[in-house]
Image (cartoon, grey):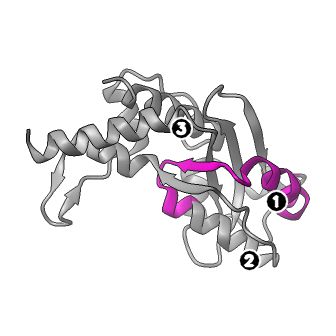
Amino acid sequence: MTVHDIARAQAINWAQDLIKAPFVIFDTETTGIGTQDEICQIGIISGWSGEVLMNTLVKPTIPMGAIASGINGITDELLQDAPTFVELYPHIWGCMSGMIGVAYNFEFDDRILRQTCNKYSLTVPPFRRGDCAMKQYAKHAGEWDSYHRSYRWIKLVEACVSHGIQIVDAHDATGDCFMTMKLIWEMAKP
């Protein structure tokens, strides 16, 4: 058994164990990627059923960055009448607290969630644990990156295409949640 076979088996086991536990998949779209940027859209779905728990634009306190807007298509005009993060926070808390939180690039979405909570002096919803579907998929795909000395991180759309998963609403928070869910279920197949 090769090192890649072991890593792939670990990723399959992760996906198989995950789908037996209560978990949510979340994704954010943001005003940018900097330390002052905020959530401007959040999607949360049940990883078991695919039930949409939250799918909303979020009115930030800062304007949309041009690069972020070019990627996610969200403009300041679209956000004008959106609810604020503070208004949405009780529902976000209710969806995430005590759950396994999964995101494709968990570190980014978790950082943005923490940044946005901190901006409003709110407590970050306590996950039972946070898991990164992107890192697990990297082990599953097995493309070694010798420069970074780890498996190559693969973009969500690229990963979905390689498994025949339909690309719907890429760079939309809830669309990305659904693609992540389908990818996890694909990874769970031995």
Return the disc, 2 or 3, that comes first in the chain's sequence.
2
Callout 3 environment at 10 Å: few (<14), some (14 to 19), or many (20+)? some
Disc 1 residue type? Lys
Q: Which residue is mark 2?
A: 118
Residue 4 visible in the current orientation: yes
How many marks are shown on the rendered structure?
Answer: 3
Residue 3 is situated, as x and y percent measured from the top left of the image, at: 12, 47
Residue 173 is situated, as x and y percent measured from the top left of the image, at: 63, 44
Residue 77 is situated, as x and y percent measured from the top left of the image, at: 80, 54
Left/right placement of residue 43 relative to residue 176 reads right
Badge 1 vs badge 2, beta-carbon distance below 8 Å:
no
Badge 1 vs badge 3, beta-carbon distance below 8 Å:
no
Residue 32 visible in the current orientation: no
Disc 2 residue type? Asn
Q: Is residue 90 magenta?
A: yes
Disc 3 residue type? Ala
Callout 2 environment at 10 Å: few (<14), some (14 to 19), or many (20+)? few
**CA–CA distance between discs 1 and 2?**
16 Å
Q: Which residues lie in the magenta part?
A: 82-109
Q: Quadrant of the C terminus?
A: top left
Q: Which residue is mark 3?
A: 170
Return the disc, 1 or 2, that comes first in the chain's sequence.
1
Q: Secondary structure at mark 3?
A: loop
Task: In the rendered view, tell whether residue 145 sits above or below residue 99.
Answer: below
